[in-house]
């Protein structure tokens, strides 16, 4: 399989290179070779990425093998894998990792389903498009930290609008942020609200690329609406959905702003995420060695997902 | 233009295209999208006594702008706004420049490692910002950039670089090669053709990339919280934190500050919504 695709990949490239018009001498002067030009064009991006991503990751990995702490004046000593061994016995590490995975497993499919529904609604033939557009763009543009604060106010036990609606419907108000489960539910609902509109925008873009003729042909064949949705719409949406899922899963694994704003991880550390625990270890406890080891684990998890998605994009075309 | 029959041909796969259903769909989307912002606006217009009353009021009984006055006088909100605006604008300009060059290389040049570069871009767009907290802090301290806009502008430029590069590359691929060749025959260099032909023809893509970058920077909280200890340099998401006392949570004032932070974004989105959405759509077509 792999060799087949490689072969079909190389043959046209040779053929195309042969077909091109021979470059004149003057144009070659003004037009450096692809490789030279590519190096120049990609250099600024590569420089920035080295400074802000690659070098810091190297430093991070190094720090994770030391006991660097800003609380003691002592210089950092190399401690091998001690930080990683410590993690195995650290309940808070397991708890925050579990919370992060739970948030990812709830909010990614949640945002996909809600976003798909919103995209289908937004794709109706409205006469005026702008109100619908605006309603998808505003949640997308709203800062995560703002969304966290606004929804913390929504879920306020005394004066929040959510409990007000519950009371009007005859239910008891819920003290959302005193119970681990309800606090987690409030956080997940907020994240789904915040992220589903981005899903919807991407899926909407995918919907609008589906040619109408496919549905007309399916009509002729006598396929019902639901079958058309299952057999035409969904398969053709797969690339758009895959792209949307990439961004969503990876950002879900990094969840910080919304739980930080809504609960600060409480009660206890029942809604704290791994990102919040890393932040706490580095900024509050100033334990940079352990914080770095936690960060390496998070980096590894997110790279696994990245690799999965890269493979998915490639195989699905 | 379109007759009834074609208007009733939904792309959905199932029929939900009647006029009442359209109205319900629009209502659902509008309430979902705008209610939180509208609710925080209503909250900001209420007085503290009205806010701490049950059952809660929906519309403010006695609308007041006092909360906005307090929001600006309790904390330097105008500075938070200014800092957010400058950091977002500077990083957007930097991202656009760097990602335009990179996107052209990806879209137009016969790169040997194109797939690898694309994979690297996606991989880099996924790195968790929180993991870079400590090393970036040390780098910024070594460069003497802590407590400057640059400490945020540089990471934010990188933050938006992958997505902007992908969006721009998708648009650049859509520009017919003939137009670029024509410009080069007229004496443009390749880079000249990039900035005189391809970038202008990809204006929706450039706008999309710019807005993505601006919103990313406006939104960022963690690095802003960590790299600028000087209150005069705080951005909005960090500054809004400062209204909370240890035991009190002045919701009306926080709401007013939130409204102040949302208004610029809302203006941006209302003005450029056409371009953002059509940009995202075209990106979807090309991508």
Image (cartoon, grey):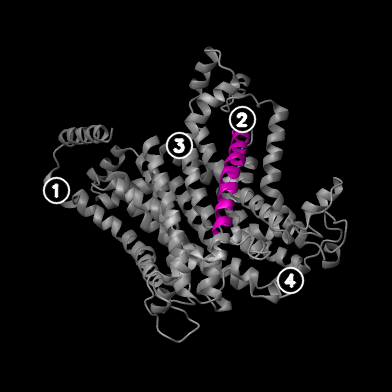
Select label 4 or label 1 by which is in front. Answer: 4
Q: Is residue A111 magenta?
A: yes
Residue under pointer 2 = A125
The first of marks 1 and 3 along the sequence is: 1
The residue closer to the viewer here, A258 or B153, is A258
Q: Secondary structure at mark 2?
A: loop
Quadrant of the frame with the N terminus of chain A? top left
CA–CA distance between discs 4 and 2? 44 Å
Q: Secondary structure at mark 3?
A: helix
The picture quadrant where one finds residue A261 is bottom right
CA–CA distance between discs 1 and 3? 43 Å
Q: Which residues are magenta?
A: A97-124
Chain letter of the residue beneath label 2 in the structure image = A
Q: Secondary structure at mark 1?
A: helix
The residue closer to the viewer here, B25 or B5, is B25
Residue B221 visible, this orientation: no
Residue under pointer 4 = B69
Q: In the picture provided, is B67 more to the left or to the right than B220?
A: right
The residue closer to the viewer here, A59 or A87, is A87
Residue under pointer 1 = A26
CA–CA distance between discs 3 and 4? 49 Å
């Amino acid at each position: 399989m792999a060799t087949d695709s490689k072969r079909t990949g190389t043959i046209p490239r040779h053929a195309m290179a042969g077909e091109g018009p021979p470059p004149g001498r003057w144009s070659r002067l003004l037009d450096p070779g692809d490789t030279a030009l590519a190096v120049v064009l990609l250099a600024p991006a590569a420089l920035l990425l080295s400074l802000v991503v690659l070098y810091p990751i190297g430093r991070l990995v190094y720090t994770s093998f030391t006991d660097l702490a800003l609380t003691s004046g002592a210089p950092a000593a190399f401690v091998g894998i001690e930080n990683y061994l410590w993690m195995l016995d650290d309940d808070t590490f397991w708890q925050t990792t579990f919370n992060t995975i739970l948030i990812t497993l709830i909010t990614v499919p949640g945002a996909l389903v809600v976003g798909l529904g919103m995209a289908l609604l937004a794709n109706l033939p409205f006469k005026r498009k702008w109100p619908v557009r605006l309603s998808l763009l505003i949640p997308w543009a709203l800062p995560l930290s703002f969304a966290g604060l606004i929804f913390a106010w929504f879920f306020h036990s005394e004066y929040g609008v959510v409990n007000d609606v519950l009371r009007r419907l005859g239910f008891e108000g819920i003290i959302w942020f005193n119970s681990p489960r309800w606090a987690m539910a409030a956080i997940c609902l907020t994240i789904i609200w915040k992220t589903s509109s981005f899903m919807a925008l991407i899926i909407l873009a995918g919907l609008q690329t589906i040619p109408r003729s496919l549905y007309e042909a399916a009509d002729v064949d006598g396929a019902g609406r639901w079958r058309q949705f299952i057999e035409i719409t969904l398969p053709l949406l797969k690339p758009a959905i895959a792209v949307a899922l990439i961004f969503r899963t990876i950002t879900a694994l990094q969840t910080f702003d919304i739980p930080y704003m809504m609960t600060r991880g409480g009660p206890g550390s029942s809604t704290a995420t791994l990102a919040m625990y890393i932040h706490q270890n580095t900024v509050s406890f100033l334990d940079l060695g352990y914080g770095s080891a936690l960060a390496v684990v998070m980096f590894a998890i997110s790279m696994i997902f990245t690799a999965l998605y890269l493979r998915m994009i490639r195989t699905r075309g | 233009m379109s007759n009834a029959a074609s208007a009733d041909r939904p792309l959905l796969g199932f029929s939900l295209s009647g006029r009442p259903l359209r109205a319900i769909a629009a209502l659902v989307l509008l309430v979902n999208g705008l209610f939180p912002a509208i609710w925080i606006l209503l909250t900001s217009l209420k007085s503290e006594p009205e806010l701490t009353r049950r059952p809660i009021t929906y519309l403010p009984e006695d609308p007041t702008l006092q909360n906005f006055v307090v929001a600006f006088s309790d904390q330097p909100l105008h500075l938070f706004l200014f800092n957010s605006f400058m950091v977002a604008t500077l990083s957007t300009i930097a991202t656009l420049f760097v990602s335009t060059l990179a996107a052209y290389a990806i879209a137009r040049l016969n790169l040997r490692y194109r797939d690898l570069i694309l994979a690297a871009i996606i991989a880099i767009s996924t790195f968790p910002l929180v993991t870079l907290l400590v090393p970036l802090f040390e780098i910024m301290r070594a460069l003497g950039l802590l407590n400057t806009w640059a400490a945020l502008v540089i990471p934010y430029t990188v933050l938006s670089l992958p997505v902007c590069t992908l969006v721009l590359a998708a648009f650049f691929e859509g520009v017919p090669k003939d137009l670029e060749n024509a410009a080069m025959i007229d004496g443009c260099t390749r880079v000249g053709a990039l900035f005189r032909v391809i970038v202008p023809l990809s204006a929706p893509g450039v706008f999309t990339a710019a807005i993505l970058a601006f919103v990313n920077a406006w939104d960022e909280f963690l690095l802003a919280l960590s790299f600028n200890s000087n209150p005069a340099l705080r951005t909005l998401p960090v500054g809004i934190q400062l209204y909370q006392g240890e035991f009190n949570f002045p919701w009306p004032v926080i709401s007013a500050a939130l409204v102040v932070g949302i208004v610029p974004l809302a203006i941006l989105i209302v003005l450029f919504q056409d371009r953002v959405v059509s940009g995202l759509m075209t990106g979807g077509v090309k991508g």
